[in-house]
Amino acid sequence: MFGIRFEAQPETILSDALKDCQTAMKTLEERTGPGSEFLGWLDLPSSMKEDGLAASVADAMKGLDDVIVIGIGGSYLGFRSVLAALENPFRSTKPRIHFAGHHLSSGYMKQLLDYLENRSFGIIVISKSGTTTEPAVAFRFLFDRLHRQYGAEGVKKRVVVITDEKKGTLRRLADDLQLQSGVVPDDVGGRYSVFSAVGLVPLAVAGVDVKALLGGAEQAMLHVREKYNEATNPALAYAAYRNSCYRSGKKIELFASYRPELQYVAEWWKQLFGESEGKENKGIYPASVQLTTDLHSMGQWIQEGERTIFETVIDVENDASLKMLKAESDGDGLNYLAGRELNEINRIALRATMEAHRSGGVPVAEFLVPELNAHHIGALLYTFEYACGISAYALGVNPFDQPGVEAYKKNMFRMLGKPGA
């Protein structure tokens, strides 16, 4: 069973927006739109099922204390979103996963290098070109530490490279040193790459069931690519909802979740939609809130601030069983909840908040997810990817390029004095 459902109030979806999204879906499937050379992600859930690299790397790294995953943007957020959604943050497992190359903080890097002193660690570096500044800087520091601790032979067992198949500095390094390596596909952009080696290799090292993840994504793939009826296709309905809100003057979308495990799914979602749609002075601004936490900080603004927002809620139906306790004194006044499941209380808070926001003039829709496991996370992420392709085409922009990302790089290289900048 597919499992992921999308529900929005019927009046929020405009007929012209739905029609444009159905046309956009046809453009996506026929591969006739701009950026069609980057549609390899459409079939990844099926094509990656027989790839054995993830299992091989996981086996090679299982005896290490720590593994550092180096990457930025789509080379890191997909993996981190799945890991955060599924891991138990209070359980100490080996190898422990750490992140580098997603910023340029010297304090963070110094602390990481100090921590790794005399520890058994490995590196997974993910970069198509191998020259993106943030991961390249991190890799130089960490590779140097690894080489000094273990020497050339030790490096072969502790460094995995995910990069271009044929060219680039990391491909040359992998070939020269005979390192284990995987491929960033030419026809898959970073923000759509979670179901490639970019996501699957580090996820397998972290102990995530990548077969279940791909199984859920494949089920979503088969479901959303066949149906042009929004009532049965959550990706199409979501794209139509987003475009309807945008055309109605709602320029900011809030991704709202009631489970802290979904924090990095929100970060991945923000890159997916922000980098795909924010072009030609168009595009919905993707923002996120963690509820109920942010009801005590952003709740006032959402309820009564400028009416330029709409909301997409992730409702996870099942969680751990934990019943509210009964106290003798009832000094906190909570005995009326005694015996009720904490998850039930959380989901009632979700319903109450949705009702309040709607009454305050905020359109609210929701994805219903049966539970947080690898299968359903795979299905949810693929549904978002497919909806993004539809939504961006309906908006009239190329979902698969990111020309604006280069602006800061040119300025930075000039200010740093990079040769030729």
Image (cartoon, rainbow, N blue to C red):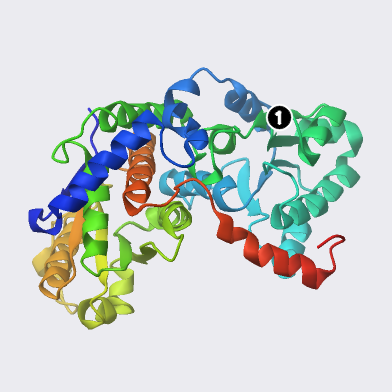
Check the image and report above or below for 216 versus 119: above
Element on which disc 1 rests: strand
What residue occupies the far top of the structure in this picture? 50
Q: Residue at point 53% right, 49% down? A: 401
User: What residue is disc 1 on?
Assistant: 181
Q: Amino acid at mark 1?
A: Ser
Locate residue 75 relative to residue 353 in the image: left or right.
right
Q: Say which residue appears at 51% left-offset and 36% top-offset.
A: 38
For the point 82% across and 46% down, which residue is it? 143
Q: Is residue 318 visible?
A: no
Residue 177: x, y in percent?
86, 30
Residue 155 percent location from the top left of the image: 83, 36
State the quadrant of the C terminus: bottom right
- 85 lies left or right of 238: right
Query: Closest to the observer: 246 or 135?
Result: 246
**From where the camera sits, is residue 293 visible?**
yes
Percent x, y of residue 369: 25, 44
Quadrant of the snapshot with the N terminus? top left
